[in-house]
Image (cartoon, helix red, strand yellow):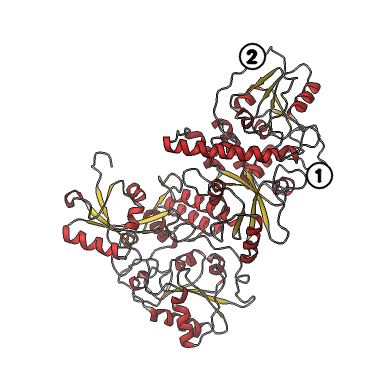
Amino acid sequence: MAGQARKTYALLSFGLWQQRADIARLLDAEIVAWPFALPGRIDGFIGWGRRSSGRRAVRLAARSGKEAITLEDGFLRGFAAGRGEPSHSYVIDREGIYFDALQPSDLDRLLSQPVTDAVALGRAGRLMAQLRGARLSKYNNSPVMTPTAAGVPHGRPFVLLVDQVAGDASIAGAGASASSFRAMLEHAVAHHPGKTLVVRTHPAAGDRSLLRQAANAIGAEIVVPARMNPWPLLEEADCVYTVSSQLGFEALMAERPVHCFGTTYYSGRGLTVDHGRLSPARPPASLEQIFHAAYIDYSHYLDLHTRAPCTPERAVEQAITVRDQRARIERKVFTAGFSPWKRRAMTPFLKGMAGDPVHARSLEAAAAAARAANGVVALWGSDAAMPADVPAMRLEDGFIRSRGLGVNLAMPSSVALDGAHVYYDARGESRLEALIAHGTVDEGLRRRARDLVRLLVERGVSKYNLGTAADLPAVAGGRMKILVPGQVEKDASIRYGSPAVRSNADLVRAVRALFPDAFVVYKAHPDVVSGVRDGGAEPQEADLIVRSGDILQWIGWADRVETMTSLAGFEALLRGKAVGVHGAPFYAGWGLTDDRLPIPRRVRRIDLESLVAASLICYPLYIHPLSGLPCRPEDLVEEISGTAMKSPGVGRKVFLCAAQQINRVGVLLRDSRLR
């Protein structure tokens, strides 16, 4: 707070020290490591839950008269358990911790006087509906499927029993024990004859599954479904049994009867059937009041990318983005022959529901490994043949790629993922072409596309975002100004997407024939200017040949853009310019461009919002430059436009220079083998 000195807190474990930046932001405090700090400058001690650090924090605080703070993961933790990725949320408790429900806690205090404001309760209701609709839970790396698909007998009613990990502090904190799980199972058997007993095991339970042990002990038949998102189970169960799991509260959100065999923050408040020992004098509370206390007042959220404090609504939006992008990659990915740099660049894009990708040295090795693991092979570009007997996909740079050129090893922020044909390969229908030709765009997606176009134009963001100044020529009034963006003539987009006009010189010649009186500027491709790629013979019919300047400045100068397949044509469409197309890029043939080459299979007529929704929102994968986590294109545009290109240190410059030279030699050798 303004005018108050920042407090200093000591962390009591290495795991907490690894999260010190988050903790400093959450508490707006100075963070030090105990015992490497002077006791006199410490205002309190921070521990984790009821682990040793949490218990020690309480002891040290009591001994020294300082403050004790207990941290724990929030109720929307993230994609998967573990410290491999940042948490969406934390809870901060200065009195206890929520799962130790038999002792006072800050959450218990909040629920002693639940919020009654109608606006606040309405917000809680909307957030609950969003969590349920999006199928978000504490962890979100399990596939969404029906109970039947996961192994629950079809057409037979079932009750759901939620398992927990033996010895977990939340069991003792609920006044329960291993015997509580047996009592819970026995109650379900006695009160639900003829129904299937479905057990949702904890991901970390393994052989320590208390309900499996109880079922073996009493001879009860149970069904343990495959790993799946819990919401379909919660919604289809006749009722839900739990000792103290957070899934019990999610079951209340799913409008299911809930039996509690332990004391939880949500039990004993008039919403659950309680079988455990309850602390006295718990006031009743509505579902919205409990949610507001737990998820809004008690929990604290950090932006996944900037790690700045954010609202729960922002955290939910980001959780959906991460889960939905990774859900697009259902199988384990095995890459084929990627360079070390490309492996590092592609790993965050290819992390899916089955975990991180595995990088193989060759296509043969990748195909063998994918075959054995029921995985999928990932290839770069369109030149390598796809394996015949194992699923495969192709990767290529996305349309909002980075700040800097790929040939200079600028890390990508977007990637296109496709099947046999990538978006620039017009020999067959790509996944992007299918989205444009057959997809539907509802009003929400259309509005989002419209806002994204406005953001791109306002922020001046394109594919590479080089930001170099352009020396724009003055042209006599009334004379049409045409920009012809040059391309790399051996690029796959020309080889597979421009069968008639195949060189920059021929393109400029065709433009001059169409517009004999126009002022034609030919802008060489940045990779050609850098000396790495071949742009072919220099066009003779252009009024001006330029080699510098950001492409967006030249698009802004021009009245019209004429191209073979360049993405500059798409960027010109976004900026309201007329575009003539001599090849078959993804944006041609839909009624938005002047098509010099017929594309018979593209018969649908669409508007710009539909094109943008398919190509920039639904098709690519995006990774945020700060976090390395999936993000929305809007977030990437904000980051690219708001961050200046950083100059690397001397050591990094030397490494990049050497790596770039190696990459350039590789590119030249590859191009030399192409016809």
Farthest residue in the top direction? 476
Residue sitting nearer the eye, 204 or 221? 204
Q: Is residue 586 visible?
A: no
Residue sitting nearer the eye, 460 or 126? 460
Left or right: residue 299 compared with residue 384:
left
Where residue 176 sits, quadrant-wise, is bottom left
Q: Position of residue 18 (x, y in %)?
A: 36, 53
Mark on residue 474?
A: 2
Residue sitting nearer the eye, 670 or 238? 670
Residue sitting nearer the eye, 533 or 253? 533
Left or right: residue 69 compared with residue 81:
left
Q: Position of residue 187 (x, y in %)?
A: 46, 82
Callout 1: SS: loop
Q: Is residue 179 above or below residue 468?
A: below
Where residue 595 sits, quadrant-wise, is top right
Mark on residue 601?
A: 1
Q: Position of residue 387 (x, y in %)?
A: 71, 57
